[in-house]
Image (cartoon, helix red, strand yellow):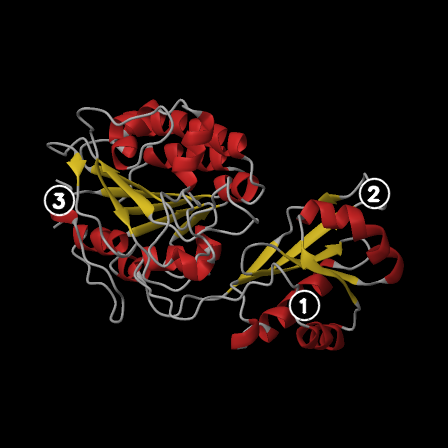
Amino acid sequence: MNAYKRIFVIVLDSLGIGELPDAGDFGDVGTDTFGHILDRMGSIEIPNLQKLGMLNLHAGGEMKGVEKPLGRYMSLGEMSRGKDTMTGHWEIMGIKTEKPFQTFTETGFPPELIAELEKRCGKRVIGNKSYSGTKIIEELGEEEIETGAMIVYTSADSVLQICGNEETFDLQNLYRCCEIARELTLRDEWRVGRVIARPYVGKKKGEFKRTSNRHDYALKPSGPTALNALQDAGLDVIGVGKIHDIFCGEGITETHHSDSSVHGMEQTIEIADRDFRGLCFVNLVDFDALWGHRRDVRGYAEEIEKFDKNLGVLLEKLSEDDLVILTADHGNDPTYTGTDHTREYVPFVAYSKKMEHGGALENEDTFAVIGATVADNFGVKMPEGTIGRSVMEKLL
């Protein structure tokens, strides 16, 4: 088809738009990340999202849709059994995950896993709870330095994280221990999406700082995705933010690490100034990591406003051969109980200057329409075993 030369898929990490029918199975009845933020705030400054039709798709508070939205929009359900970052992103690109990744938010990791980790690493584990990474270093960093122990913790995500002081633990030894943890957590009952090395420096409380030597040990996708198909066809597949980590580099031709969601959008704007043919796939994590998990409604709302400003800059740079798709990977309702992700529909808002008109599309039951649509645009066949159907004919 090749209707568009460049497609930008931007994931507003955790910006769900209301509970899925099976939300009760996940303890998430009544969740609505975007709607509840609007209800609490009354209104927020998002003129660009508004004109594209985001509020026509899902309104809240004092805010309503516009009479003639510029974009095409619908809600997407999730087929996969999960509500985490990897499951959501993998489904966007065609993979249905039958077995959800394990989380250990409420209990910490089981004694059997900790015992094996201690034995294989030769270090005693301290921590083993769900906690903020910066706070657990403040709490246990001095003990780790003094005793040679190893700080292990988790979060609301499916992740095992190990902290190590670079001056006393040794960075390569920290990486070795994380590789051991990755091997152990391949077992179904311990299967987490990522193991993360979290090195830091400093000698006492108040001085500790995490360094840029973080390293993620993610699982490879369970099969080829739309990204692999695009790469194999000789197209550019540019990842911004966590995309490289989420897909373990599979199908990515170029990657850009982001320091924040604002930085991620600035990188995307810079990429829009370049000549390329293919996909720019962007993850903006701060909505989730900084505000959703911390149940900070105002912070989340302000992050959406920051995004909207940069979205306006990006829209100005687009040519008629460009398509932008805005979406999310799960919910994380900051008004809900706990700190976990929430099982929600996600938005699909698409815009191009080439579109003759905007308006609603029929809702779909899987995020995978996005990957299938991107592949269809470039005349690329989706890999065998993937899910999703293209809606490209509705985006012209």
Q: Is residue 295 above or below residue 253?
A: above
Of circles 1 and 3, the one toward us is 3
Which residue is the site of mark 3?
394
Can see residue 178?
yes
Which residue is the site of mark 1?
176
User: Which mark is first along the chain, 3 or 1?
Assistant: 1
Position of 107 with respect to 127 (left or right) is left
Report how far apart the C-alphas of labels 3 and 2 lie in the structure.
Answer: 57 Å
User: Which mark is first along the chain, 1 or 2?
Assistant: 1
Point out residue 229 in the picture as x, y percentages from the top left corner: 27, 61
In front: 136, or 194?
136
Which residue is the site of mark 2?
205
The residue depicted at 88 percent of the width and 61 percent of the height is: 147
Of circles 2 and 1, the one toward us is 2
In front: 353, or 188?
188
The residue depicted at 39 percent of the width and 33 percent of the height is: 270
